Amino acid sequence: MLVRGQLQRIAGARALGLNGGNTALTADVWALFSNPANLGELEKLEIGSYFERRYNLQELQYFAFAAAYPFHHQHAGGISLSSFGWEFYKSNLIGLNYVYHLLKIIHLGIRLNYANIAIPNYGTWNSFLVDVGGNAKISKKINIGFKVLNANQAEILGDKLPAEIAIGMKYQPSQKVKLLTEFKKNHLFPVSFCIGLEYLPTEYLVFRTGSAISSHRLPAPNNYFVTSSFGIGVFWQNILLDLAAQWHDKLGITPAISLGYQLSTQKK
């Protein structure tokens, strides 16, 4: 049970504000932590940093950094770094991401990850994980995304690292509104469902909210939990600031902040 659930795979206050329903959400550097294919619509070099305090506990602090670049009209790539825990338990993840554009409407991605878990006076363990994903533009308003995290079933000390499969949809009825839905299945838990909404009243401001219901293997009535989230984003010139908070009905509040910067370099 050393590693189960301890590798954090989602980052960015935008994702948290949408309650994690971002498998079909494109054009964001934090796609490096969600669907490997979702960098496909990125138009500029973008970098970002993220901080989260899970359930407002110092022992569950989470830091992440990401950088992505669309280096050709058919290719994009990026690097991600993250660290979770505190001085007596630390898990780290380094990822390299590549995306290929097929027919301009289908994006296929792969991410190679190096995982490290360290416990003072006990030891350090390492492993490699492979994530794959795809995103298809079905129409001007609809995108469908899928992902498989830890597709190679990597283990540490005989314990499988978190593996997940998910499928999601983004519906954009207008330039100001995005509706996201997602079903996901972790190898440890039953299927969960989440829904998120993003609304841009102006080009400088965005509001987000989301909700999810998940279940686990505890006796009823404690065999499910609900999470709700809210977030706000501010755009100023090339700077993106996102704030979010997620509420877990049994464990409490998780606050988060991310800061991003877009360079003006355009796709070649």
Image: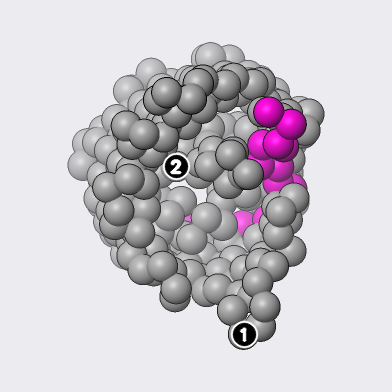
Q: Residue at x 58, y 46 (%)?
A: 5
Q: In terms of depth relative to the viewer, which is nearer, 20 or 68?
A: 20
Q: In the drawing, does residue 183 fall left or right of residue 229? A: right
Quickly name the residue at label 1: 221
Q: Residue at x 33, y 23 (%)?
A: 264
Q: Residue at x 56, y 51 (%)?
A: 22
Q: In the drawing, does residue 172 fall left or right of residue 193? A: left
Q: Residue 190: percent from the left, percent from the top?
A: 74, 64
> What residue occupies the far left of the structure in this picture?
236
Q: How many residues crowd mark 2 within 10 Å: few (<14), some (14–19), many (20+)?
A: many
Q: Residue at x 66, y 21 (%)?
A: 128
Classify mark 2: helix, strand or loop: loop
Quickly name the residue at label 2: 11
Magenta segment boundaries in residue numbering: 157-177
Q: In this rendering, is residue 151 above or below 229?
A: above
Query: From the viewer's perspective, is the residue at label 2 or at label 1 nearer?
Result: 1
Quadrant in the rendering for residue 105? top right
Amino acid on which disc 2 is placed: Ala
Q: How many residues crowd mark 1 within 10 Å: few (<14), some (14–19), many (20+)?
A: few
Is the N terminus in the top left, top right, bottom left or bottom right quadrant? Answer: top right
Classify mark 1: helix, strand or loop: loop
Q: What is the number of callouts on the image?
A: 2
Amino acid on which disc 1 is placed: Pro
Q: In terms of depth relative to the viewer, which is nearer, 132 or 25?
A: 132
Q: Residue 62: percent from the left, percent from the top?
A: 37, 40
